[in-house]
Amino acid sequence: MERLTPVEQKAPGRWQVATVAAIKPETPQVKSFRLQVPMWMALADGEVSPYFHDVVVEGDQVEVRGPFTSYFVWRGESPVLLVGGGSGVVPLMCMMRHRRLTMPELPMRLVYSVRKADDVIYADELDGDTVLTFTREPPGDWSGHTGHIDADLIAEAGVDSGIGFVCGSNAFVETASQLLLDAGFDPQQIRTERFGPTG
C-alpha cells in the first residue's frame, strides 16, 4: 500500500465543486447521489454547468462516469505554483486552503487570470500568495497586471521550480504549461486539468 504524505493524512477529502447533499446505497455497486451545484458554476459557454442549471430538474437521473482525463492531487510537495484561469481556480484554491490550514510554512503561490472583477471567485480569500491579472476589464483602480498570463506574470509569482498545477480552458492550460516550461519547471512536475471552451 502506498504511504500517505502529510497532506494526504490531514486531508478531509478531495475537492469538489458540487456539494454531495445525500448518498443512498442502491446496491453494493450502485449509489444515488443528491447534488447541489452552486449557481456561480453556471458558465454560459461551458459544457456541463449549463446542463445542470438549465436542463436537469429535481428527480432526474444522471449517469456519472470518469474521470476520462488526467486529474491532479497535491501531496505536500513544495515549492508549489498554482496557475488558474477563470473557474479553473476551484481545485487550486482547495489546495491553497488546505496548505494554509495544515502547513502554512510551505511555499505556495497562485497566479489567477480572470476576464473582469465580477469573475473573481474567492475574492475575499486572495492575499499576498496570489498574483492576479484581468484579461478584459480591470477595475478602475487596478494597478496590477492586465492582459493574458505571460512570462512576466509567472516570474512575479517568484516560483521557478518545484511542482506546478495548471487548471483552466484547453487554450489556457496549453499557454500556462508552456510558460512554466519556459520558466524552468521540469515537464514531469507540471500537472494539468482542463475543461471545454468558454468563449
Image (spheres, rainbow, N blue to C red):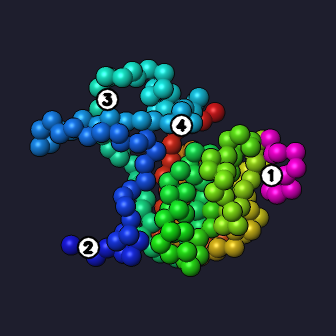
Whole-Å distance between the Cαs marked 2 and 3?
33 Å
Check contact, mark 3 vs mark 1: CB within 8 A. Answer: no
Which mark is first along the chain, 4 or 2? 2
Which mark is first along the chain, 4 or 1? 4
Which mark is first along the chain, 3 or 2? 2
- Up-down relation of residue 7 to residue 167 (above or below): below
The answer to whether residue 162 is left or right of residue 130 is left
Whole-Å distance between the Cαs marked 2 and 4?
34 Å
Which mark is first along the chain, 1 or 3? 3
Say what amino acid the circle numbered 2 marks.
Answer: Glu
Say what amino acid the circle numbered 1 marks.
Answer: Thr
- Nearer to us of marks 2 and 4 is 4
Say what amino acid the circle numbered 3 marks.
Answer: Val
Whole-Å distance between the Cαs marked 3 and 1?
40 Å
Asked which secondary structure carries label 1, the reply is strand
Whole-Å distance between the Cαs marked 1 and 2?
43 Å
Which mark is first along the chain, 4 or 3? 4
Q: Which residue is mark 1?
A: 146
Check contact, mark 1 vs mark 4: CB within 8 A. Answer: no
Q: Which residue is mark 4?
A: 41
Instruction: Check residue 2 in the rendering and tell me which mark sits there, or answer none.
Output: 2
Magenta residues, as a range?
137-145
- Up-down relation of residue 151 to residue 167 (above or below): below
Whole-Å distance between the Cαs marked 3 and 4?
18 Å
Residue located at (82% from left, 57% from top): 144
**Residue 124 seen in the figure:** yes
Q: Which residue is mark 3?
A: 62
Prevailing secondary structure class for the magenta stretch in the rendered image:
loop
